[in-house]
Amino acid sequence: MIRNGSLRLARVGTARPDIAHVDPVLCWRPNAIGSPRPTPTVTNTNREWRLAARPDGEPDMDCFELHETDVPSTDPGELLVQTRYLSVDPYMRGRMRDAESYAEPWDVGDTLKGGLVGEVVESASDAYDPGDLVTGEGTWSDYAILDADAVAPVDPAVANPEAYLGVLGMPGRTAYFGLLEVGEPKPGDTVVVSGAAGAVGSVVGQIAKRNGCRVVGFAGTDEKTDWLTDDLGFDAAINYKTTDDYRDALDAAAPDGVDVYFDNVGGPITDAVFTKLNLDARVAVCGQISHYNDEEVPTGPRKLPQIIAPRAKVEGLLVSDFATRFEDASERLGEWVAAGELRHRETVVDGLENAPDAFLGLFAGDNIGKQVVQVAPDAGGK
Ligand code: NDP
């Protein structure tokens, strides 16, 4: 295992000698368009990250252990996938806590789970062939077993594969449904987004612009605020780390008040936005990352009086509530991306061994756009 930078590799499970000699002839089945025969490069070792300890406040490397195991084998209906890109997401902090939440908590010793894009190297399903690129829910590991019914194809002609973890994945769908269904933006509305330069926020702002809104974003560096205004078309962006008075900044950036607030972060930014809500404003509470490492919920004066006069609607949103319509969202987001109308960016950390750093970096604001980890190189796949 690797903890605190010192390399201690724990080998578990029994060796599976056959997997080291995967015969491409046995694995390969021709597909309809007669693509060239892929040559799977399955090794017999699989590294996987496990939860070593629950964090107390901000997580650190003591919470993670890297183990070496055997490459798992498929049962009927399953795929063995070599991870290319792994997603790290703020909600995973909730899974490290021993508390009921919308995502099941991890137990200490569990292999960490997460979205991935990978290449099928062994298929026990008619739906996918070795060499196919797919996306689905896997583990923080070199190889993962995924149910063929629960993955979606990745089309590199639409976007780079890692975009399927961001704008074309769960964060993009969160932005799409959260803004359109909960925020209900109307042309002329002012939409404020916190966490605006992240995976969800950057998509929210652009969809709001498509809907004829004035869009204001909060983000933590000048590089991020410049990206929002210069590249993504936001009307204004506020660097909350260099701005003393968020209310004054909002007076300038949102002079007509706030009709929709898409909240990714909570805390003082949210307190300030609540003082600027217009009549019938909608607040979509998507995330509260500024509180995820709190061991106690902060108490004190609440901002709820601010929603009385404007009769504002404050509503929590969960992307999974829209699961039956994910395909619609993916189709529209894919069209916008392919047409160059929806911009996206991914921050890529290299190497599975650096996955915990990539995750911890979310709380320091290290990412612009979607944070992913590159686990295997991009060669191959179709
Ligand atoms: P991001 O890509 O936005 O990454 C997190 C960002 O949060 C960081 O880059 C950082 O940017 C910002 N941040 C970190 N700490 C703070 C802080 N104390 N105050 C203000 N900003 C902070 O993550 P996602 O787009 O994946 O997720 C955004 C939010 O949406 C999260 O809260 C997440 O939990 C939530 N979410 C909810 C879903 C749902 O169904 N309800 C689904 C998906 C995500 P900066 O430099 O600007 O500080």
Image: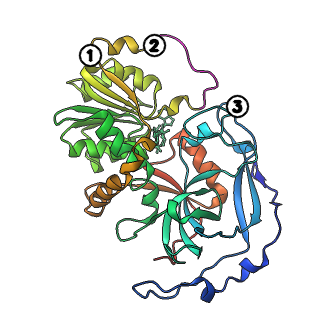
**Who comes first in sequence, dot 3 or dot 2?**
3
Residue that numbered label 3 is attached to? 56
Give the magenta-colored segment's residue range: 293-301
Q: In front here: 309 or 228? A: 309
Q: Which amino acid, by three-letter code, is at mark 2? A: Arg
Q: Residues within 10 Å of mark 3 (few under 14, many from 20)?
A: few
Q: In front here: 317 or 255? A: 317
Residue 339 placement, left or right of 382 = left
Kind of element beneath mark 3: loop
- When asked about the image quadrant of residue 374, the answer is bottom right
Residue 147 placement, left or right of 317 = right
Which mark identifies residue 302? 2
Magenta stretch encompasses residue 296: yes
Q: Residues within 10 Å of mark 2 (few under 14, many from 20)?
A: few
Q: Which amino acid, by three-letter code, is at mark 1? A: Pro
- The response on whether ligand 1 sits within 8 Å of label 3 is no
Taking 269 as reference, is 193 above or below it? Answer: below
